[in-house]
Structures are given as C-alpha cells and as structure tokens.
Image: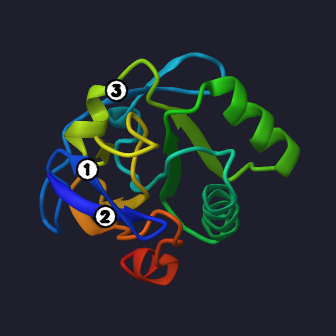
Amino acid sequence: MTQITLGGNPIEVAGTFPVKNATVENFTLVNNGLENVALADFVEKRKVLNIFPSIDTGICATSVRVFNQKAAELNNTVVLCISADLPFAQARFCGAEGIANAQSLSTFRNKALHTQLGVDIATGPLAGLTARAVIVLDENNTVLHSELVPEIKQEPNYDAALAVL
C-alpha cells in the first residue's frame, strides 16, 4: 500500500499506481447516460485520466473545470474525469458548470478499477473512494505522466500533466 494524506492525516491507498512507460490495461466505466464506456473506445487518442474522490468537493470540481478548459486547446486528446460518484451527480455538475470538453465517468460498476490503477483509498473517512491522481496516456495506453497527489486536499500539477501532450 501507498500512503498519502487527507488534511495532513495519513491514509492508505491500495493497488499499484502506474508509472511512466507502464501500460494501462483496458477498463470499463459508466458515462452520464448510464452506458458502459471502455478505455478502448478512445483508441488512437491520447487520454488524460483526471481521477478524484468526489465531484461534490471544491478541489475535485476545480480539477474538472481546469481540465475542461485546457481540453479545448488539445489536439487528439480526450480528458476523462473519473470518480466513484453516481452518473446522476456527475451529470448535474457538468450541466450546471457547462462542462463540454471533458467526459465524466463513474467507477460505480467497476470498483476493481480503484485497485487496478492504484488509487483505492483503503483507510480513513474516504475509504472506498479514489485518491486524487492524474495519469496521461498515449494512443496505445502507455503512461506518459502519472501523479498520485500526496495530499487529497491539494490540486494536481496541471502543467506537468499537460506538458507531455
């Protein structure tokens, strides 16, 4: 297990977080229309996986807004905002915020993905949700950049993630 913090308090994260040059295996999540969406559906595109605990928290919402804004400037790249939130909550937020350049996807049918990507919060008050992380993949799902944010209440390094694109 990996250790990160929540408000300075240590929490454990299960799974093995992917590192640069690793390959991320295909997975399936659920979009706002309750349809299954696979990583393989984005073949031949670069992917920014913006992973966070819940859309209903300030920092998570900010990361979605920032990546949505930046996504409009990217060629051949899709931003996937991934959380355990139900698609209804994601759709409500994206509709209210005018999120059009990033796709929100839920892990609610595939909790195993939390461990597969090494972001499964195993201890503490947010156990069962995902840690904050950004994983940037090339067209073949090879990791170009990965950041497991060490403090959940901290924003990811947007510039570092976008620099590899």
Q: Where 23 falls versus 4 (above or below)?
A: above
Name which residue lies at 32% across and 34% down: 40
**Where residue 114 appears, x then y in whole percent?**
30, 38
Q: Nearer the viewer, residue 93 or 136?
A: 93
Identity, as a three-letter code, of the amino acid under mark 2? Ile
Identity, as a three-letter code, of the amino acid under mark 3? Lys
10 Å crowding of disc 1: few (<14), some (14-19), many (20+)? many
What is the quadrant of residue 130 in the picture? top left
Q: Secondary structure at mark 3?
A: loop
What is the quadrant of residue 64 in the picture? bottom right
Q: Which residue is mark 1?
A: 13
Q: Where 50 falls versus 71 (above or below)?
A: above
Q: Nearer the viewer, mark 2 or mark 3?
A: 2
Identity, as a three-letter code, of the amino acid under mark 1? Val
Choose the circle earlier in sequence order: 1 or 3.
1
CA–CA distance between discs 2 and 3? 20 Å
Q: Number of marks in the image?
A: 3
Q: Where 20 falls versus 39 (above or below)?
A: below
Q: Which residue is mark 2?
A: 4
CA–CA distance between discs 2 and 1? 7 Å
Choose the circle earlier in sequence order: 2 or 1.
2
Q: Nearer the viewer, residue 131 or 103?
A: 131
Q: Which residue is mark 3?
A: 111
Q: Are the two marked residues, 2 and 1, in contact with CB atoms closer than 8 angstroms?
A: yes
